Amino acid sequence: ETRSNLKYKIQHGSFNTTGMSLSGTSAKNKTYIWGNLSHLGSDGFRENNDYSRNSGISTIRWEHPAWSLNSTLMLTDVRAGIPSSIGKTQLETAPRTAASNWLAVKGYKKYTKAIGALSFKHNTSDIISGEAVVFGKWNNDYERRPFNNLDDMSSGGGFRYEFSLQPGNLQWTSGTEIIYEEYTWKLDKDNTIINHNSEKRNQYSFFTNLTYRISALSLSAATALNYISYSLVDRFPADGDQSGKHRFDPVFSPRLGANYKVSEHLSVYASAGHGFSMPSTEETLLPEGLINNNIKPEKGFQYESGVRIGSGTSRFEADAAVYLIDLNNLLVTKRLSEDIFTGINAGKTRHYGLELQLRADVFASNRFPGKITSSASYTWSRNRFVDFNDDGTVYDGRYLPGIPDQVLNAGLNWLPFKSITISPQIQYTGFQYLTDDNSLKYPGYLIFSVRASSVFSLKGSRMTAFAGINNLTGTEYASMVVVNALPPPNGEPRYYYPGMPWNFYFGLSLTAKELRN
């Protein structure tokens, strides 16, 4: 027997924004196929802010009692105008305008991306299993900019194998991952090539994790060993051969964790572990294209403790955690001019905070006023430089810029009747500093949104009509900031990316009746 269905969705809204998608599934015996095609286009709310995206994704799964095989392929094609960031006066008086230099050249970015993976899972016995994954990616980009144009392409792939052994209360997992990446880029200005390089990067990881359960107590210990090397090939020798190789020291990262189930609806947990982040391609290079041999991976220890209340069947669920992270060599961006920047290490930093998630069934009735459920997530954090000296300027004790002090997302789902849902939401983003010396601060802002939908049957199919309004009160705000922005030759530093103003959308989705044959 073959079972299949289709789902179609169309949406339209402010700024001539239109989205369409078509997805479908087909299942026969032990074979399952799913696919989705989508398009999103918009004129944008700012000058030079048009956007177009076409994408497709498909998965195929074959199942067997002792094994399963999964394949995934995703293709994406995007073209987007770049209005760029603007200064304070422009943000307050004309937020829909683009930065003048980007508007003058009609700056834009376009890219084509492909990602694929094939995984094989096997169960040798009830206690022995494993999974092997082969994956790859390809990306072709072009960016038109006022200072130069960037034409770049990246490709890569890898292999990962994970082996699991689960005898009794013990679970042991171990594996390895190998990743290869190549990034090639070309810079030109006024149709003259000014730089052309490629970088190859290899990463090897070995990991193991051991978990042991004793009644209500679960203990875990894990380790990982990572090794990364990369090489730069200069394809533009006119300015001198800048080719070179660099290897980072191997990074060993241990972790310990514990979870104790106090009762059916209460658990406490704690963990401590080491982590790291390797520099990106841009951060491993100096502005002139040379290898930045002084750049180091950021490393640190994280400590976390928390409590979970409730379960999947509870009317109230909560997860609260506090954390502390001590980092060495935090990777930050240093701007040398308005459009030239490089990566540097920011000495020692300390990050601590609180994370909270809540869900509650506020009201439940089979008649009006119906059912109300609520959910919320909240983060409060403090992030400081402990030891950071940048060219003689000491920032010890200052807050890291570009990180809001708190973020709140909360919403309700109200079903006054069986087929109608009304969902109001709020988003609050706290203040954040704009510079390392904390001399400039951007205040917090609050956004209200609402969405309503109605579900009804149509000849055995399921149709949903929906509409919504984002930024209901028309709050003027910057959705993203550029830290440590430097002033251009004429004008203010461009710290701000304006956020979306009041906007609406409406649409229909249709899930066709399942077909069987």
Image: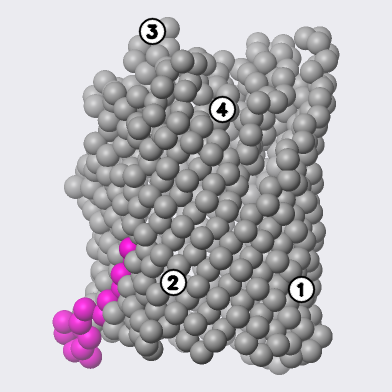
Label 4: how many Cα within 10 Å (few below 14, some 14–19, many 20+):
many
State which region is magenta. Answer: 356-370
In the structure shown, which secondary structural element does the residue marked by tag 2 occupy? strand
| Residue matched to label 1 | 163
**Mark 3 and mark 2 in contact (Cβ < 8 Å)?**
no
Quarter of the picture holding the N terminus: bottom right
Residue 274 against residue 34 in the figure, above or below: above
Q: For marks 1 and 4, give the CA distance.
A: 38 Å
Label 1: how many Cα within 10 Å (few below 14, some 14–19, many 20+):
some
* Percent coordinates x, y for residue 377 in the rendering: 33, 61
**In the drawing, what numbered circle is on residue 344?**
4
In the structure shown, which secondary structural element does the residue marked by tag 4 occupy? strand
Q: Nearer the viewer, residue 58 or 492?
A: 492
Name which residue type carries label 1. Phe
Q: Earlier in the sequence, mark 4 or mark 2?
A: 2
Indicate which label's residue lies in the foreground, 4 or 3.
4
| Residue matched to label 3 | 490
| Residue matched to label 2 | 269
Q: For marks 2 and 3, give the CA distance.
A: 54 Å
Q: Earlier in the sequence, mark 2 or mark 3?
A: 2
Q: How many marks?
A: 4
**In the drawing, what numbered circle is on residue 430?**
none
